[in-house]
Amino acid sequence: MKTRIVLGIESSCDETAAALVTGDRVILAQRIASQDEAHRPYGGVVPEIAARAHAERLAPLIEATLADAGMTLDQVDAIAATAGPGLIGGVMVGLVTAKALAMASDKPLIAVNHLEGHALSPRLADAALEYPYLLLLVSGGHCQILLVEGVGQFRRLATTIDDALGEAFDKSAKVLGLGYPGGPALERLALEGNAKKVRLPRPLKGSDEPHFSFAGLKSAVLRAKQSGEHSDADIAASFQQAAIDCLVDRLTRALAKVGPINALVVAGGVAANKAIRGALEALAAKHGLPFIAPPLALCTDNAAMIAWAGMERLERGQSDPLDVAARPRWPLDPEAEVVRGAGVKA
Ligand code: KG4
Ligand code: ZN
């Protein structure tokens, strides 16, 4: 059978993106328009500005992506778009565009959960990765440990009770005057610092409950900066090490609780962090598990992961009606208890 092709659309935060992905895991074309410049003066994503930028850019971006692949919409087998969770204005721009394309071309529409996009992206990169696997999903809006049992089958084992890890990176970076988005800049600065110089807390480390907490760590970074006693590089390195210690501790707990799994997997924007990758790789090795992380370009928000999640659904005969709703909140595991703080996004 000829391999199928899915057009993926992503617009849930501050990246406008489109991609064409085949059932054989080939990314035929992909384009991403970042809005970092538009949001930089505000130090964070402004929803109204984001929605307007998506509305202006998305249609030409899709056209250009098809042109890059030398294709027309007729050659696409399905159209997949992020339908949530995320900033609702942007999500609606992407989803409504996908509906119009699906209607005009008479192709199936697939409404993708953005988090499922992140969670399945390692399977786009690695054909050998089989369900079930343990996933650390770390992004600007989320910090969760999930047991991924199949398409649409997730068990959330842990989440954050306050800040997501990417949020803690971004806020700490802001305290250190590193600008927005801060995660990558903080990682670079940390390379020049000594992680043992600044004593910072490891919230919930060793705790009986499964969750993460990063608000206390972020506040401690602010106090360390205000004390004037430490170099920014030492604060950055110490922050990053504290975050890594928390991740490793919470994952060790989760690994002791789950049944047999095929791999330890990391996904989401923070998975671009090389120090974090290194620590997780060591942890996986200690547990005799393969460690799998998607290539950096697939870690941060992108449309290839949305197209791939759409492909996995299409291959299982799934699609959505044209009246499917955009969802600002959309937990991967509907059974998971709502946790303090994290309830906003997770
Ligand atoms: O998945 P993503 O692109 O967007 C969502 O939140 O859905 O993740 C963005 C987050 C931001 O908080 C950004 O600072 C963080 O990922 N990030 C990093 C690195 N690269 C991106 N955090 C730490 N180290 C990095 N190298
Ligand atoms: Zn994301």
Image (cartoon, rainbow, N blue to C red):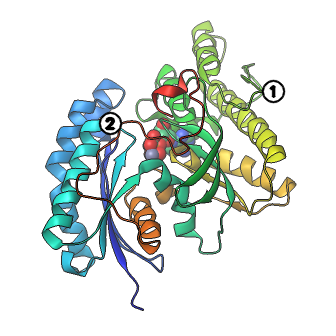
Q: Nearer the viewer, residue 199 or 28?
A: 28
Cα distance between the residues tagged 2 and 1: 33 Å
Visible residue check, residue 97: yes
* x then y, percent, for residue 185: 50, 37
Q: Is residue 207 left or right of residue 43?
A: right
Q: Position of residue 245 (x, y in %)?
A: 75, 34
Q: Residue furthest bottom?
A: 1
- Residue 72 is at least partly visible in this image: no
Q: Which mark is residue 345?
A: none
Query: Left or right: where does residue 73 sit relative to residue 142?
Result: left
Tell me: residue 17, above or below residue 24.
Answer: above
The residue shown at (53%, 41%) is 334
What residue does disc 1 label?
208
Secondary structure at numbered mark 2: loop
Q: What is the quadrant of residue 64 in the picture?
A: bottom left
The answer to whether the residue labelled 2 contacts the one labelled 1, judged by CB atoms less than 8 Å apart, is no
- Say which residue appears at 13% left-offset and 68% top-offset: 104
In the image, is 263 to the left or to the right of 319?
Answer: right
Q: Label 2 neighbourhood size at 10 Å, few (<14), some (14-19), many (20+)?
A: many
Residue type at the position of mark 1: Asp
Quadrant location, the N terminus: bottom left
Q: Where is residue 311, by image quadrant?
A: bottom left
- Number of the label disc, if any, that sits on residue 87: 2
* Whether the residue under disc 1 has CB within 8 Å of ligand 1: no
Taking the image as shown, residue 32 lies to the left or right of residue 183, namely left
List x then y, in percent, for residue 189: 58, 35
Mark 2 / mark 1, whichever is N-terminal: 2
Where disc 1 sits, the SS reads: loop
Residue at 75% from the left image edge and 63% from the top image edge: 290
